[in-house]
Image (tube, rainbow, N blue to C red):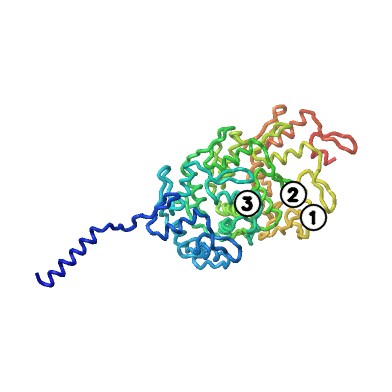
Amino acid sequence: MSSTQKDQHGARSQRSQEADKPHRRKREKTYTCDECGKDFTVKASLKQHQVIHTGERPFSCDLCGKSFSWKRSLKQHQLSHTGERPFSCDLCGKSFSFKFSLKTHQLIHSGVKAYSCDQCGRAFTQRSKLQRHLVTHSGIKAYSCDECGKEFTGKASLKHHQVIHTGERPFSCDLCGKSFSLKRSLKTHQLIHSGVKAYSCDQCGRAFTQRSKLQRHLVTHSGIKAYSCDECGKEFTGKASLKHHQVIHTGERPFSCDLCGKSFSLKRSLKTHQLIHSGVKAYSCDQCGRAFTHSSHLQRHLVTHSGIKAYSCDICGKTFSQRGDRNIHLRIHTRHDVYCCEQCGKQFITHTELQQHMFTHTEERPYKCDLCEKTFKSPRHLRQHQQIHTRKRLYKCSYCEKQSDTDGSSSQPCHHCGGGKDFRCDLCGKTFSWQKTLKRHQRRHTGDKLKYCKECGRSFTTSSYLKQHELIHSGVKKHLCDQCGSSFITAGFLWLE
């Protein structure tokens, strides 16, 4: 056998011997944790994992004292003190401290969800999110609040909840003053002001700042209403909408405004309302310059410029630019979710209208002006009066001669008459300051939607005018003058006296 043949034979024998040795295939997991049974491919990974069970956190931050199990976690945390976030997303502008965090985030925009739940089919962009989701199916809630006993599936959810008891909201928005308990909640909120809406609906084109809001919106297209009210049977697409509705049946409004006394069923509704008193209007219309306290109010206003009324009533055909306005209108026909006055039985389609109506049953004037001590029945009338004392310059409109904080010009139309933009009746030539007043007047000519008195047959354009007229036939005079003792049918006649 030649030397070359010997070398070849030796190499084959060596490879054969190595093949006979026990070897580990690529990515085979050979290191197992004795505590929880989790497998690892590398011994160093097992050691890093075991720290979870020991509870050791030897690496602490010099600035805030927070401690960590691993050195890399400490380094990652320390970036939060520097504020450096050099990696930003081209689609939504969100910035990150690490490149891998940006890449993880970009999966949201790509739409790739490689990890799916075997039990419900829901898919996720990251395996860690799938793991957190699987806990919801187990029913195990290992984290409980020491204050109220409420239980949670995750530690993060518990921490988020505990802020309710402390009341701390250290993160505030520079544009509108709204404060938050978590920094991420502030960042999510700030997207509203940026105007960036990276998540759009394929069916109607509506765009959203957050993916979660898009997901909730998509349910409206499916037509599925999985949540129903036990009291009246009304169905809703979301659990939050059901809870919001159920307040109608309880009537509870525990959150009240210190400035005007208006009460609300939800704390967030009170906070939204309080922005009105702050005077901050961070959202302005590009077309007419009008400013609003909330982004949603601006969005509703923008529809008025388009002239589109996409929502129509199936019963009477009336069209609306907003779905909410259409739904409120439907209460007139269905009588669902109406508010009833306990004293006279009159029904209203909104709680605000009921509150305004309740002032007609009392002669009390609990709202007093701090400057001149004049008293009023409602906070709305008090606010209107207080404008007299403010430094805001009042103009006398050249069209209607009423005082307003605008001069009645085309750039600043008067709130009373619209700056002389009269609405004229084609049949009799009578002019009106408001289009709704013109429409009400036109019922006289068409006979449409007129209300008739059963006693004398006289017709009225609105139900309120009819009810006021019917008091004449009843003979009831419940409004008494404190000065002379004379009684009157309506409060209006009393004040005239």
Q: Quadrant of the N terminus?
A: bottom left
Residue 490 at what x, y percent from top left? 79, 36
Q: Indicate which disc, 1 or 3, sits on the residue closer to the N terminus.
A: 3
Residue 192 appears left or right of 391: left
Circles 1, 3 touching at the beta carbon (< 8 Å):
no
The amino acid pointed to by label 2 is Asp
**Residue at image mark 1:** 388
Q: Indicate which disc, 3 or 2, sits on the residue closer to the N terminus.
A: 3
Q: Residues within 10 Å of mark 3 (few under 14, many from 20)?
A: some
How far separated are the C-alphas under marks 1 and 2?
22 Å
**Residue at image mark 2:** 258
Secondary structure at badge 1 equals loop
Q: Residue at x 48, y 45 (%)?
A: 135
Residue 483 appears left or right of 310: right
Task: Give 83 or 223, whichever is nearer the viewer.
Answer: 83
**Residue at image mark 3:** 163
Within the image, what quadrant is residue 472 found in? top right
How far separated are the C-alphas under marks 3 and 2?
23 Å
